[in-house]
Image: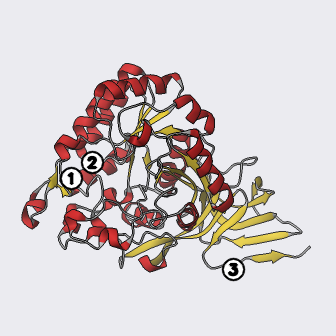
Amino acid sequence: MRMIIKNGTVIDGFGSEVKADILIDYGIIKAIDKNIQASDGIVIDATGKYVLPGFVDMHTHLRQPGFEEKETIKTGTEAAAAGGYTTVACMPNTNPPIDNEIVVEYVKSIAQREGVVKVLPIGAMTKGMKGEEITEMAKLKKAGVVALSDDGFPIMSAGLMKRIMTYGKMYDLLMITHCEDKTLSGEGVMNSGVISTMIGLKGIPREAEEVMLARNIILAKSTGVRIHIAHISTKGSVELIREAKEKGVKITAEVTPHNLTLTDEAVYNYDTNTKAYPPLRTREDIEALIEGLKDGTIDAIATDHAPHTKDDKKVPYDMAAFGISGLETAFSVINTFLVQKGKINMKDLVNYMSINPANILGISSGIKVGKTADIVIVDPYEEYVVDKDKFKSKGKNTPFHGMKLKGVVEYTIVEGQIKYARDRKIEKIEV
């Protein structure tokens, strides 16, 4: 199918920002120029819009197999497309976990048949994600995983973690680590501080993240493995990663939209949709995280999309599941709180949400002649009110429900095919 995207402001991910048309033919970008004409195909009018490389989320929970009541590969990828994502990397905490090549092939086959965007499986570090026996990494890599992680089940044994990293280096596999010392986080449910004391909820101290992060940095330096730190949340973590990069450790890091924008004050009314791990921290932490993005300490913005059922959240705060459904609000949250307030610009957003995560995962991204047409078209100025009941995702658990945000996804194009069109106004070119 031939397609022309007309009159948009194209940010290509390689440093260029220009008003131009894009010609796509059979899924490949054929031309980027002014006033492109064609005799057949479809035209998308992107006047007043930005045309960006499709977003890449390197931390998504699709829940299938095993937890289809929370999300499926179909509904999760539909949510991704609505959020402007053309690729998602799915975490292994399914049932059974993605800890062997059979489950990897299952996820890939379902994604091929029912998925709306590209799905990249992440394999488990240990069998059953029990933190005891290392998975067969060679088989997982051959099956197609892009990284290894035990996700929310941190490897508490330093000796085991070092062995995992040693083998990971041997197979050139990226290690994605959830940094949490369970002996410090205990039964905590929110940030440990003044707010938790005032409202009577058990706190999770920042040390729970920072102690484990420091350990993993030391082990990564010792083994030489590529390590990626999932969803950092504290000022201290930013400082540790900055220092590690200065010392040459092969380390990258991500931060979530909610940890960049909401503080623990959002927990005042006991809304369980604010319960996430890591927890919402303080304004000082947010400022440090934003500075970490700006100076290159933090590489990517990832959603940690964690859909849950209503029953998972409709309980007392300390009993509720951790997690926020984030794919469909990520762009507008970052645009509203960071871009529109001048903290970053749209080129920065492209780097954090597309180029950098793609580079970390070892996949292609960017808008360039000859490349696959994975593209998102956004209107950064249109306002809307978040309505969780309109989510494509099964997970309606968002702390942004009812909030007015600025910035909408108009079209998501995957390999030259329109996978999401907000207004459905597409003009057919007559032959």
Residues packed near mark 1 inside 10 Å, few (<14), some (14 to 19) or many (20 plus): few
Q: Residue 288's mark?
A: 2
Q: Which residue is mark 1?
A: 284
Query: Image quarter for residue 376?
Result: bottom right
Asked if the residue under mark 2 is in contact with the one under mark 1, i.e. CB atoms within 8 Å, the reply is yes
Q: Residue at x 25, y 42 (%)?
A: 209
Q: Residue at x 22, y 36 (%)?
A: 211
Which one is earlier in the sequence, the residue at label 1 or at label 3? 1
Which one is earlier in the sequence, the residue at label 3 or at label 2? 2
Query: Image quarter for residue 166?
Result: top left
Q: Position of residue 181 (x, y in %)?
A: 23, 40
Observer-nearest of 54 and 118 = 118
Q: Which residue is mark 3?
A: 425
Q: Position of residue 65 (x, y in %)?
A: 52, 56
Q: Can residue 400 be spotted in the picture?
A: yes
Q: Can residue 18 be spotted in the picture?
A: no
Observer-nearest of 336 and 227 = 227
In which quadrant of the rendered image does the N terminus lie? bottom right
Q: Residues under labels 1 and 3: Cα distance?
A: 44 Å
